Amino acid sequence: MAQATPPMVVVVDDQALFRRSLQHRLRSVGYDVMGAENGVEALELLEAAPGNCVVLLDLLMPVMNGIEFLQALDRRPEASKVRVMLVSGAGVLDRVALDSSRIVARLQKPLEMSELRSALESELGPATGRPPGRSLN
């Protein structure tokens, strides 16, 4: 019997410590996680990644910011199964009006892990390969 592929999460944030910490926490509970420092790197990762995934997207980044990333993603029909959760600092989410159908959640930094877990499970289902007794909280 084939093993199920873990749900894919792509963390896109220019703050390396935040990105690596979030990747580690998500991996420890069974998600398949990749990280990108900006929107350009994220688009390159998504070209090689399975189509069904969730992107945790910071809005304020150098090279290609979150808004530019969403616009580029919307021009790619092959990325139709990619959903986006905006993850940004206080006030940023309130000031940005985005109506992309890909946006499934808006999460504010500092991130509440229980809120993130609930949002991810509603989009991807429970992480496969989750170690017994491990949770994001």
Image (cartoon, helix red, strand yellow):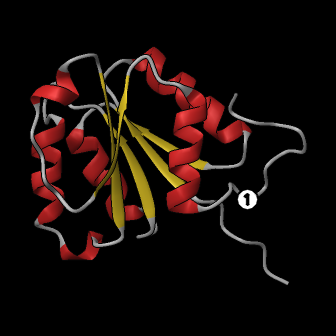
Q: Secondary structure at mark 1?
A: loop
Q: Is residue 116 above or below residue 4?
A: above
* In the image: residue 88, left or right of residue 29: left
Residue 21 screen position, x and y as percent: 56, 22
Q: Is residue 50 above or below residue 134?
A: below
Q: How far across and down, in percent of the image, does residue 86 sit? A: 30, 39
Q: Nearer the viewer, residue 91 or 69?
A: 91
Q: Quarter of the image containing the C terminus?
A: top right
Badge 1 amino acid:
Thr
Q: Quadrant of residue 124?
A: bottom right
Which of the image's four quarters has the N terminus?
A: bottom right
Vertical order, 97 against 111 (above or below)? below
The residue shown at (53%, 25%) is 112
115 up-or-down from 2: above or below: above
Q: Which residue is mark 1?
A: 128
Foreground of the two, 88 or 131:
88
Q: Name the residue: 66% across, 40% down.
A: 27
**In the image: residue 75, left or right of residue 52:** left
Residue 52 horizontal side relative to residue 24, left or right: left
Q: Position of residue 114 (x, y in %)?
A: 61, 33
Between 26 and 1, the residue placed more toward the observer is 26
Question: How many residues crowd around disc 1 within 10 Å: few (fewer than 14), some, or many (20 or more)?
Answer: some
Question: Could you tell me which residue is drawn at 64 percent across and 31 percent down?
Answer: 25
Q: Locate residue 61: give its quadrant.
A: top left
Determine whether, in the image, residue 131 is placed left or right of residue 55. Answer: right
Using the rendered image of the protein, determine whether residue 80 is visible from the camera's viewpoint.
yes
